[in-house]
Structure formats: C-alpha cells, structure tokens
Amino acid sequence: MANLDLNEGYARSTKGLLKIFVIITTCVAFAVYIDHYGRVHYGRGDFFTSVHIAGFAIAIIIFLVFLVSLENSLGSARCWNILNMVASLILGILCIVSSALVIGDSGKRAPDPLIAAIVFGFISGVLFLVDALIHFKEIR
C-alpha cells in the first residue's frame, strides 16, 4: 500500500496554487449559472455546465494526487504531468468555447449572474491553459 504523506510544498507551489484557483473559478462558474437558471438547461447552457463540472472534478482529482504524493505510486510523475498537461489544455479550450457560446445565447441584455458565470468561465479557461503551459515547460 502506498504511503500517504501530505506534500505541503505542492499546495504552496505555483502549480498547487494555480490548481486551487482553477478549482475555485470552475466551481463559481457552474454554481452561479445553475443558481440563476435552475436545474433545466438546454444546448449551450448544458454544455457550459457539463464542461465546468468536469473541469472541477478533474482538477480536484489531480490536485489530490499531487497533494498526497500518489503520482509515483500510481504510475510515474512524468505520466501524471503529461496527463495534467493534456487535460488542462483540453479543458482550457472547452471552458473558453463554452463561455463564448453562452455569450452568443444570452441576447442583448444579459443578467448579472450570467455575466459573472461567463467571466468566471473565461478565467477558468485561461487558468487551465496557463496550467498546461507550466506542465509543458516542465515536461520539455
């Protein structure tokens, strides 16, 4: 069985803090959207919500793997860095695209909660892309 030591250095590092900000922004994006529109979403709103919930879940899993130093027990650290880079790249693009699609669906006058959800969606997309870039530089 793997030894579960808490890696406090990761939580204080640039990668750890960036992952924490990604978790917060994706959570705020889908929470504000769901709170404003309720449980029924169609089309673009469904895509926005799904992408941000998936990004939230994946970011938490990757953060926990590195926080408890499981990256060497569950494969190699290089494989986890590649996985993190690819996941962050894909989720960054999807967050930006889904936010842009919700802008197109909002009409002329968007309500304030929708604007907040879109802004946090774009911020989470940019943070995912920065995370992918950091891991790309580390791998290379």
Image (tube, rainbow, N blue to C red):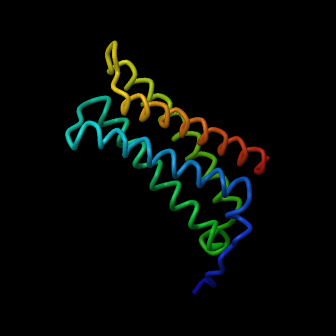
| Residue drawn 58% across the image and 61% down it | 63
- Viewed as shown, does residue 139 lie left or right of 43? right
Tell me: residue 112, above or below residue 89: above
* Number of dots carrying numbers: 0
Residue 54 x, y percent position in the rendering:
42, 49
Task: Report whether 36 appears left or right of 135.
Answer: left
Residue 136 in the image: state x and y as whole percent. 72, 44
Furthest-left residue in view? 40
Counting from the top left corner in percent of width and height, residue 67 is at 63, 68
The image quadrant of residue 46 is top left
Closer to the camera in the image, 121 or 84: 121
- Residue 22 coordinates in the image, percent (x, y): 56, 48
Answer above or below: position of 2 versus 114: below
Name the residue: 33% across, 21% down: 106
Residue 102, located in which quarter of the rendered image? top left
> Which residue sits furthest front?
112
Which residue is found at the position 23% from the left and 32% from the top? 42
Quarter placement of the N terminus = bottom right
